[in-house]
Amino acid sequence: MNYKVEKKIVCKETGEELKVGDEVSIRYTSGGGNGCCRITKITDTGFHYSAGGTRRDKSVQLKDIVEIWKREQNDEGAEK
């Protein structure tokens, strides 16, 4: 999937928009990935995220990502 950045991340194929505060899961081109990450900052080339209780934000570039899934939650905060 290809993505572009405009104060939010927009998937060019599906039109899905991701913004700061969204919880996402990430799959990398290397085959690995992260689940339940909260986007903390969007940059020109990617974004910073917080993975659970880590002290520092981590960063990732869009060129290193195969796909990003937005976690859907119901009104009580549980995953759908």
Image: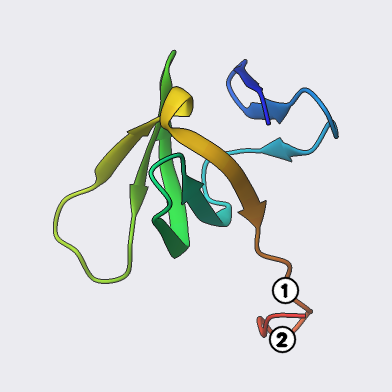
Classify mark 1: helix, strand or loop.
loop
Contact check, label 1 and label 2, Cβ < 8 Å: no
Q: Quadrant of residue 50?
A: bottom left
- The answer to which of 37 and 12 lies nearer the viewer is 12
Q: Position of residue 1 (x, y in %)?
A: 68, 31
Which label lies toward us, 1 or 2? 1
Q: Residue at x 52, y 50 (%)?
A: 21
Check the image and name the residue furthest to the left.
55
Q: What is the crowding at mark 2: few (fewer than 14 residues within 10 Å), some, or many (at least 20)?
A: few
Mark on residue 76?
Answer: 2
Vertically, is 16 above or below 52? above
- Looking at the image, residue 11 sits to the left or right of residue 13; the answer is left
Vertically, is 71 above or below 40? below
Looking at the figure, which quarter contains the C terminus?
A: bottom right
Give the residue number, with chain letter if any, for mark 1.
Answer: 73
Q: Residue at x 62, y 27 (%)?
A: 8
- Looking at the image, residue 46 sits to the left or right of residue 14; the answer is left
Q: What is the crowding at mark 1: few (fewer than 14 residues within 10 Å), some, or many (at least 20)?
A: few
- Looking at the image, residue 4 sits to the left or right of residue 64; the answer is right
Amino acid type, callout 2: Glu
Q: Quadrant of residue 54?
A: bottom left
